[in-house]
Amino acid sequence: MPFARLALRMPLLALIHRSASCLIMCGAGLQSPGYARMIGTMNCTRCKTKAVLKLPRHNAAFCKDCFNSFVHDQVYKAIRSQEMFGKNDRILVAVSGGKDSLALWDILLKLGYKTDALYVNLGIGGYSESSQEKVVHFSKTVAAGYGAVLHIHTVEREGGAGIRELAMMVHRPTCSTCGTIKRYQFNRIAVEQGYDVMATGHNLDDEAARLLGNVLHWQNEYLEKQGPSLPASVDGFAKKVKPLYRLAERELAAYCVLNGIDYVVEECPMAQGARTLLYKEVLNRLETESPGTKQMFYWGFLEKSRTTEMPTNIMEKDRSTLHPCSLCGQPTTAETCSYCKLMARANTSTAG
Ligand code: Q46
Ligand code: ZN
């Protein structure tokens, strides 16, 4: 009785309800009061057994098995159509303990890809503790069975302080400090450990919200790099891909719930008030009124970019502007990279 199992998970879904990103999921209908009544009468579009989930944007409803194969198909399509990687490549997934990245690790392993993971512990008190716990649990109970390895990088061990303290020392917003550190460490570890590609758990909602932000501010440079597959343009840069861009946030939450993947439900406490959450909310309202809007917006953008001559080629541009950082050797446009600058400022502040 798949629906009964989903119903048993309701307390977890209720918890999801409280987190900011899941206001969006609720808007899409997964936990609405009439949902159980409505889905109770529906059959799976593919196999005609009882459905556990309705997907308005696909005008479909699925049982657990058909939903899992729908999710796997979407990821496989993303990988093939964007030429992300092949079965012989070594993939490094950036995991945070949240639903998207753990679902991604699970899906890639089940699809037969050689996939290890990297978790960066940011040192944000209880949030980092519980997210690391979820990642380690998944690694031991699922990933280890496929021979996959979990790498853990602890910001405090290398930087001498957690992300919030480091941000205060260098007088920069926490999320921008965090972004610099995560980008740097993911790339460094992928390159040093010889991975062919680095994968992140960005989903359709993330990409549509980011696109909306970039369009609202006409950030042309960011728009050029909004695709789900970024090549390793120069030595020292890993190829970066987003295999979940065809799946919505609520679909990934449902995938975790249905497959017993235990993920950290609460948002990072630093995310509160982030502009992206507002964009997601707006897009979600549009999605409720007109299912398929997010997909049309982001996939439409990808289709247009594919058929439009881009003013500059990312590879050419990177090759003409990037060179090795004088301190660490990672590609940068300046004399020293932003990570080395950040660490130098943090060290000066500690010494002072
Ligand atoms: S983890 Fe880092 Fe996010 Fe937390 S500190 Fe900000 S950027 S909100 S993806
Ligand atoms: Zn550097």
Image (spheres, rainbow, N blue to C red):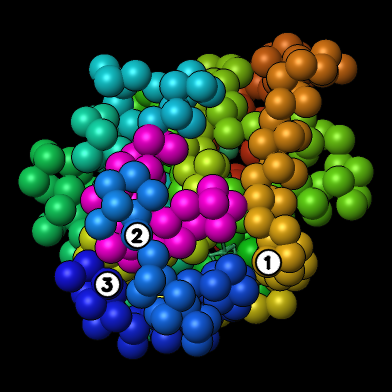
Q: What residue type is labelled 2?
A: Asn
Q: How would you rate the neighbour count of disc 1 (Cα within 10 Å): few for under 14, some for 14-19, many for 20 or more?
A: some
Sequence-wise, the earlier of marks 2 and 3 is: 3
Mark 2 residue CB less than 8 A from any atom of ligand 1: no
Ligand 1: image quarter = bottom right
Above or below 144: residue 282: below
Residue 3 shows which numbered tag?
3
SS class, disc 2:
loop
Question: Is 317 left or right of 166, judged from the image as shown?
Answer: right
Q: How would you rate the neighbour count of disc 3 (Cα within 10 Å): few for under 14, some for 14-19, many for 20 or more?
A: some
Q: What residue type is labelled 1?
A: Thr
In the image, 240 versus 40, the foreground residue is 40
The residues tagged by marks 1 and 3 sit, at their Cα atoms, a distance apart of 23 Å
Q: How many marks?
A: 3
Question: Is 318 left or right of 182, judged from the image as shown?
Answer: right
Disc 2 designates what residue? 43
Which residue range is magenta in the image? 50-75
Above or below 98: residue 168: below
* Rendered location of residue 197, percent (x, y): 42, 28
Disc 1 designates what residue? 288
In the image, 294 versus 330, the foreground residue is 294
Question: Is 232 left or right of 6, judged from the image as shown?
Answer: right
Q: Is residue 14 visible?
A: yes
Q: What residue type is labelled 3?
A: Phe
The residues tagged by marks 2 and 3 sit, at their Cα atoms, a distance apart of 11 Å
Q: Can residue 275 be seen in this view?
A: no
